[in-house]
Image (cartoon, rainbow, N blue to C red):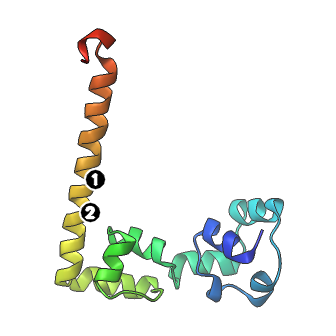
Amino acid sequence: MKPATAAKKLGVYLEATPAEFQEGVVSRSELNALQTDPPEWLQELRRNGPHPRPVVASKLGVSIAGLARGGVTEPLTTEQIDALKQDSPGWLRQERATQAEVRKEAVRLKEKKAERAAQPRDERS
């Protein structure tokens, strides 16, 4: 697979990986080996970053779109993410609240769907 795909599956920022990783092709067995026994460079990237947007969004508890609305378009290090959490700017508080509402609505819809599925077919109409 392409290095970009492998980096995405590993949850790391491609441009921060070693040159040999970026320039090569990663087989499925190599990817599995990286996941089960990560080398030091991969452990370091996962620990300290820079992290790709999906990881940044997850660590901050917001969506990727929420990051963009907050003006965060570049990869961030763990230190930068921790600083953002500490500062808790208005946009971050708002996006976290939005994300919490989205999650609550998803749970509500899932429960509603489960209730409908549990009803006998003739009672649904």
As helix, strand or loop, the secondary structure at mark 2 comes to helix
Image x and y of residue 96, in percent? 24, 68
Q: Residue at x 68, y 70 (%)?
A: 5
As helix, strand or loop, the secondary structure at mark 1 comes to helix
**Residue 26 appears left or right of 5:** right
Q: Is residue 52 above or below residue 102?
A: below
Please give the label number shown on residue 103.
1
Q: Nearer the viewer, residue 72 or 109?
A: 109
Quarter containing the C terminus: top left
Q: Quadrant of residue 108?
A: top left
Q: Are marks 1 and 2 in contact (CB under 8 Å)?
A: yes
Please give the label number shown on residue 49.
none
Q: Amino acid at mark 1?
A: Arg
Q: Residue at x 31, y 38 (%)?
A: 110
Image x and y of residue 93, in percent? 19, 74
Q: Nearer the viewer, residue 86 or 68?
A: 68
Q: Nearer the viewer, residue 69 or 31?
A: 69
Q: Quadrant of residue 62?
A: bottom left
Q: Is residue 96 above or below residue 76?
A: above
Q: Residue at x 22, y 86 (%)?
A: 87
Q: Which residue is mark 2?
A: 99
**Residue 8 appears left or right of 6:** left
